Amino acid sequence: MLSFFFEVLIGGLLSGVMYSLVALGFVLIYKASGVFNFAQGSLVFFAALTFVGLTEHGLSFGVALVVTLIVMVLAGLLIERLVLRPLVNQPQISLFMATIGLSFFIEGLAQLAWGANVRGLDIGIQDEPITRISDTLGINISKFDLAAAGIAAVLVTALGLFFSRTRIGRALRAVADDHQAALAVGIPLQQIWAIVWAVAGFVALVAGLLWGARNGVQFALTFVALKALPVLILGGFDSIPGAIVGGLIIGATEKLAEVYLGPYVGGGIEGWFPYVLGSSAKKSSAASDAGEAHDAPTFCLLTSDA
């Protein structure tokens, strides 16, 4: 019984790392421009469908991967240049609505170019238990889940270090804190935005390949990005470490809830439990903040000004 618990828990944590990868795309854009990029899920779908479409037209895995990477980087640059840059200094709701419209455009463009049929995606990793772990520990861990989580973890860690240790990363943090102050000290705001959108396109490619290989390349991939919402609520919209922790929590709790609570509510709990958890955490946080503000208003005012 205990081994089964750990099997479910580990499977959830591995899925959580992949959720963190999807959430990372949202975090990067939000940190740079303060915009929740509703189109990130559409970019994931577009990347996976483009890669599969290229392979179906005879390109090898490596060539298709490079071409798709170039397409996604260019897509990120074009989105920043043609859609968001003209809306600089506009209300945040205008930027958010622009990303909603952009998501519909990308979804339609992807299916117009490559078709709407469901495709399989093989990245060379079998979705089968690791025999050695099954024999020694009695726990079934999928080779694909472990490899995909490893790839996602390496990418998330690399991007986290890049944006925390490099000059571009420091510039991004300055832009996130105050656009006008960043411009005043000579930080090229538009270049930073372009870089971040290009990186978001790359992240969408990796997420699209991993989730496409797991669930098939289909329109439902756009909904995978919605799982990033409770991750972001738990970890914060502008925190890369928060995206990692939030992803692990959501991944683990949704699997455990599906197995141990699902039978009591008729199943299907995995689809909505993360949102309940995220909403509950948000309400608890709001209640805690309200209590602190009532008990110690001076401290709260000082911390908000800082």
Image (cartoon, rainbow, N blue to C red):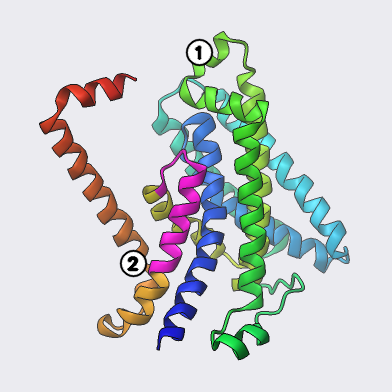
**Label 2, on which residue?**
273
Q: Which mark is residue 181?
A: 1
Question: Percent x, y for residue 120?
Answer: 69, 74
Q: Nearer the viewer, residue 196 or 97?
A: 196
Is 238 magenta? The answer is yes
Crowding at label 2, few (<14), some or many (≥20) Cα neighbours within 10 Å? some
Q: Quadrant of the C terminus?
A: top left
Q: Percent x, y for residue 243?
A: 48, 49
Which residue reaches farthest top?
184
**What's the amino acid at mark 2?**
Phe
Q: Secondary structure at mark 2?
A: helix
Q: Residues within 10 Å of mark 1 (few under 14, many from 20)?
A: few
- Residue kind at label 1, given as amino acid type: Ala
Q: Is residue 166 above or below residue 122?
A: above
Position above or below: 290 against 298: below
The residue range painted magenta reads: 235-253
Could you tell me if the residues under marks 1 and 2 are in contact, i.e. CB atoms within 8 Å?
no
Left or right of residue 111: residue 176: left
Judge whether residue 111 can be spotted in this image: no
